[in-house]
Image (cartoon, rainbow, N blue to C red):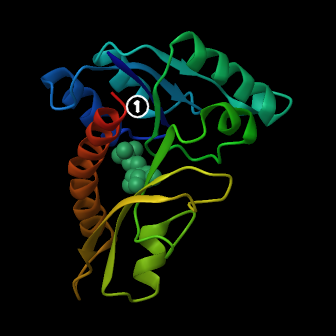
Amino acid sequence: MKKLAVFASGTGSNFEVIVNAVKTGEIKDTEVAILICDNPDAKVIETAKKLNVPYFVFDPKTYHKKANYEKRIVSILDENQIDLVVLAGYMRLIGKTILNPYEQRIINIHPSLLPKYKGLDAVGQALKANDHITGVTIHYVDNGMDTGMIIKQKEVTIERNETRASLETKIHQIEHQMYKQVINQILKERA
Ligand code: GRF
């Protein structure tokens, strides 16, 4: 049985799809052992409760420094014997406290064709640039921002009448399909 930890800060639609894919067996022989969330008001916490996934929620403001909450996270990952950390809308850079012990075991999903439109609001960046194409990238996490080795990418066309809402919907649909396939593939390779 492989064990996942999902990190999320907001809505958690990717988290929900991953948990359901584990339940239906689309992601095989796997358990979502824990949700890690840095925002006590996030909707994803309600989803974790509904789906009976244990969660650790913390408020970074209450810690003196990043290394302190990251140490706490590492001890939770270790206790749960996590095989793969899945970032799904986690709005913080992973620091070396987590990265060093978990390198090659952390993946992220980003709503652009990296290396284009790194960082915050990649969808807004693509719209502002009047680009005709953007997409989704799944990559390993390294010490940069959205710079780790790319695992898979998919293009999304930006139509002439595209709105932010319509583009976000298209991107989310692709993400929901792509993330579970990639997770399954990585876990299979490491079985
Ligand atoms: C996704 O678009 C993902 O690419 C980005 O954050 C968003 C999270 O969406 N990193 P959700 O919270 O899973 O709905």
Which quadrant does the N terminus fall into? top left
Is the CB atom of the residue marked by disc 1 within 8 angstroms of ligand 1's nearest atom? yes
Which quadrant does the C terminus fall into? top left
Q: Nearer the viewer, residue 90 or 94?
A: 94
Lateral position of residue 191 relative to residue 41, left or right:
left
**Residue 6 versus residue 134 in the image, above or below:** above
**Which residue of the protein is positioned furthest toward the right in this rendering?**
64
The residue beneath circle 1 is 44
**Residue 82 versus residue 42 in the image, above or below:** above
Lateral position of residue 173 relative to residue 130, left or right:
left
Label 1 environment density (alpha carbons within 10 Å; few <14, some 14–19, many ≥20): many
Lateral position of residue 176 relative to residue 78, left or right:
left
**Which corner quadrant of the image does residue 6 belong to?**
top left
**Residue 176 versus residue 22 in the image, above or below:** below
Across and down, in percent, residue 186 comes to 34, 40
Q: Nearer the viewer, residue 22 or 148?
A: 148
Across and down, in percent, residue 176 comes to 24, 47
**Which corner quadrant of the image does residue 170 belong to?**
bottom left
Across and down, in percent, residue 61 comes to 76, 33
Q: Nearer the viewer, residue 2 or 112?
A: 2
Q: What residue do we see at 15% from left, 32% from top?
A: 26
Q: What residue do we see at 67% from left, 33% from top?
A: 98
Lateral position of residue 66 relative to residue 166, left or right:
right
Q: What residue do we see at 51% from left, 73% from top?
A: 115
Q: Amino acid at mark 1?
A: Val
Across and down, in percent, residue 17 comes to 25, 36
Q: What residue do we see at 15% from left, 25% from top?
A: 25
**Secondary structure of the residue carrying numbered label 1:** helix
